[in-house]
Image (cartoon, rainbow, N blue to C red):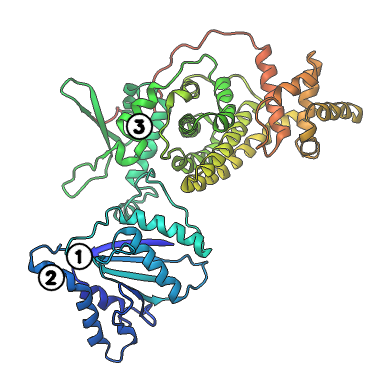
Amino acid sequence: MIAKINSGKSTAGLIRYLFDTKRAKDHTDPHLVGSFDGFAPDPGRAEDADAVRKLLVADLDLHVKQAGRLGRAPEKHVWHCSVRAAGSDRILTDEEWADIARRVVHATGIAPEGDPDGCRWVAVRHAPDHIHIAATTVRADLRTARHWNDYLTADRELAAVEKHYGLHQVVRGDRTAAKRPTRAEQEKAKRAGHQKTPRERLRAAARTAVAAATSTEEFLTVLENTEGVLVEVKRFPSGDVRGYTLALEGDTNGEAEPIWYSGSKLAPDLSWPRVSERLTATAATARPWQDAITAIEDIPRALTHDGATAGQAHITALGETLDALPLLAPAPYREELRRAAAAFERASRSRVQAENHHAARLRGAVRAMLRTPPPNSSDGTLLALLLDTLVLATAATLRWHDLHHHDQQVTATRDALTHLHVAADQAATTALATAKRAGPTSPAVRLRYERVVRVVMPEHTDRILNAGDWEALAATLARADTRGLDPVEVLRAAAQRPLDDARFPARLLAWRIQQSTHTAQAPRTMPPAPQPTPSLAPQPGGPHTRH
């Protein structure tokens, strides 16, 4: 059920609208289903509807007029709450709607149960799937009702109503979502030929800059080098940065001035203090690609066994990893990865305050990846392993949000998983083909590695041996065998890391074994030299920047 709450100045105007059947064609059989005392006059059931409507308005306005004589009546004294059921819900009876109305006015403080001085209200039903609650906010003791945060309290009560009546349970937020573009912003973007509004485009640019930067100074530099983005840095008298605002070139107001958005207006986690906190929680690494994979593999364990604040830190860092991935992946995978990052944006925040130092290793690895070419992996297994590992971490995130009843984050994580599955399957195609070409052809050889699987992983044997990618794992074990490695020990080492959420365990094990054997045989190298700040599509001639 969804509630929508407004305030107004005219009780007569609202009642006239609620009982109108001429101009409002969807108003069928308007009538009262409940009222403050159970005896309010019903214009919908009267022969002289106009006269009865005036009586109803007078009843509702009684205390407003009394307070007005004392100069205590609020200007906006009308409280209007519409409550709508989901399209899949059964048709509720008038008695059930009356109960829902009483619960809403009680929860919001309009007319608390058992309070003889509560506000006067009526509930009008003029369509099968919703009601309107009309109330005046002056109590019988002539004080104004205390109904602050009424939308949140009504929404919380409607969640209980849904469970009580067995109705569709609406996915509810926790006030950590980024602000949605207004209708005016959407229409303006359409007129300009853009699918995304300036707010959404700037949010994506800022999130990518957070994922790419290693310091707050570099964060601003990356933004300044982003095509089409204007940056204005706010400073204290001391010269220290106190905040930043962004604007999109060409997005102007009526005075032809850029329309600026502060980081906090783009998303709660893009405020300057939150960005600063995340960028200080970064650890250096000399083997970024392997370290990133190792850190991501640890996320399912951390979400299960570490505290909530540590878990939120890992999820936030996972979101930053997805933001950075389109800059690292080959062109065929970028669109799905962008969609995954955009979906996961909502899942990366919750009411749980992150202790970001817990995810310092992953943050450092991701930032170093942007400055370090990937190790030689012509067979494509490195990217395939990274994506399949991200799938496992995202699936663990889904469980974590579900456990904490983060409904909107659960939905967002599912959407992100859908796009990650597509990208991971695309990356696996090339790697599987390469592995299978070198696979064992002799039935006797394949039987040997089947026995290895049965010994090491009896609980996963059927899923592995009956899958189409079993040949790739068999081939990988055969190559390890020819290099003098014990296939049993190699498989056992690969199976130590999370596997339960893997859709295709055979291929994930193959990627792990190939990367571990490559790493074991690769010569040790010095850490890469620092690289220039990554640029996100720089504009020729440099950025337009204000300080």
- Mark sitting on residue 138: 1
- As measured in the structure, the alpha-carbon distance from the residue carrying label 2 to the one carrying label 1 is 9 Å
Q: Earlier in the sequence, mark 3 or mark 1?
A: 1
Of residues 370 and 407, the one nearer the viewer is 407
Is residue 547 shown to the viewer in this render?
A: no
Q: Is residue 488 above or below residue 189?
A: above
Q: Earlier in the sequence, mark 3 or mark 2?
A: 2
Q: Earlier in the sequence, mark 2 or mark 1?
A: 2
Position of 340 compared to 502: left or right? left
Position of 233 compared to 323: left or right? left
- Residue linked to disc 3: 226
- Residue linked to disc 2: 66
The quarter holding residue 532 reads top left
Of residues 88 and 83, the one nearer the viewer is 83
Quadrant showing the N terminus: bottom left
Is residue 515 shown to the viewer in this render?
A: yes
Residue furthest out toward the bottom = 47
Residue type highlighted by circle 3: Thr
Label pair 3/1, CB-CB below 8 angstroms: no
Residue type highlighted by circle 1: Val
- As measured in the structure, the alpha-carbon distance from the residue carrying label 3 to the one carrying label 1 is 54 Å
Label pair 3/2, CB-CB below 8 angstroms: no
x 41%, y 61%: residue = 2
x 51%, y 65%: residue = 165
Residue 355: x %, y % from top left: 42, 27
- Say few, some or many: other residues with alpha carbon within 10 Å of mark 3 (under 14 / 14 to 19 / 20 or more): many
Q: Is residue 354 above or below residue 198?
A: above
Residue 315: x %, y % from top left: 49, 33
- As measured in the structure, the alpha-carbon distance from the residue carrying label 3 to the one carrying label 2 is 61 Å
- Say few, some or many: other residues with alpha carbon within 10 Å of mark 2 (under 14 / 14 to 19 / 20 or more): some
Label pair 2/1, CB-CB below 8 angstroms: yes
x 44%, y 43%: residue = 346
